[in-house]
Image (cartoon, grey):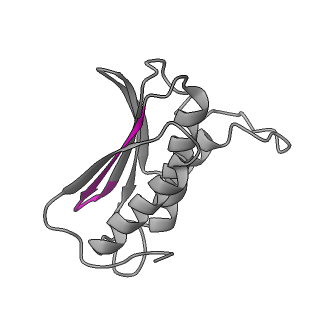
Amino acid sequence: MNGLAVHELPAASASWRIALPHSTAAVPLARALVRTALAELEHGADSDTAELLTAELVANAVEHTVGDSPIELVVELLPSGCRVEVHDPDPAPPGDLTVPVGKVPDPWQEHGRGLLLIRTLSSSCGHRPTESGKAVWFRLPALTPGGARQA
C-alpha cells in the first residue's frame, strides 16, 4: 500500500521490535516493516512519510556507526499516531535534531539532508541514551478521515 492510509485508529497501542543487519540491506527491510505495520492494522498515519523517515534513520545508523552489531527498529502504533525508533550501538548523539535558524543547506551537498527531513516532516523527534548506545526517534500524527494530520 502506498500513499496515505486513512482508516480507523487502533484503540490501544501495538508495537514491533526487530533486529536488522548492520548493512545497507537493513534500509529496505525497515521500510517494508513500517509499511506492513501501518497497512495491516489499517493505521491512520502517513505511510509514505513513515517509510521515508525510517529509511533515513536506519541509513544514518548504518553509515555513522562502526562494527557489525545489529540495529534495532521499534515501531509503535498509538491512537495519536506512530512512533519509530532506531537503536544503534554508538552512544554519541546524532547530528542536530533541532531546526537550524537561518541556516540554508547547500543545494549541491549530497549528504546531510536526512535529519533535516526528519525535523521537517515529523511532528517531533529526538534521541535518548540506551544501555547499549542510543535510540533516535520520530513521531507522526494520525491522519483524520479527510487525510489531514491531527493536531
Q: In the displayed orientation, state which residue is furthest to the left.
A: 12
Instruction: Write the residue at 48% across / 50% down.
Output: 54
Between 57 and 105, the residue placed more toward the observer is 57
Asked whether residue 35 is drawn in magenta, I would say no
Query: Measured along the vertical axis of the image, is residue 116 above or below residue 78?
Result: above
Q: In the displayed orientation, state which residue is furthest to the right.
A: 108
Between 29 and 137, the residue placed more toward the observer is 29
Q: Is residue 107 visible?
A: yes
Q: Position of residue 85 (x, y in %)?
A: 37, 42
Q: Position of residue 9 (x, y in %)?
A: 23, 71
Image quadrant holding the N terminus, namely: bottom left
Instruction: Write the residue at 52% across / 23% down.
Output: 67
Between 115 and 28, the residue placed more toward the observer is 28
Between 92 and 80, the residue placed more toward the observer is 92
Image quadrant holding the C terminus, namely: bottom left
Query: Measured along the vertical axis of the image, is residue 48 above or below residue 28?
Result: below
Instruction: Write the residue at 34% across / 21% down.
Output: 132
Query: Measured along the vertical axis of the image, is residue 124 above or below residue 96?
Result: below
Q: Is residue 143 visible?
A: no
Q: Which image quadrant is residue 62 in?
A: top right
Residue range of the region highlighted in magenta in the rendering: 70-82
Q: Which image quadrant is residue 110 in?
A: top right
Q: How many marks?
A: 0
Query: Measured along the vertical axis of the image, is residue 57 above or below residue 30?
Result: above
Q: Position of residue 114 (x, y in %)?
A: 61, 43
Asked whether residue 79 is drawn in magenta, I would say yes
The overriding secondary structure of the stretch rendered in magenta is: strand
Q: Position of residue 123 (x, y in %)?
A: 42, 51
Task: Tell whether 25 sits left or right of 141.
Answer: right
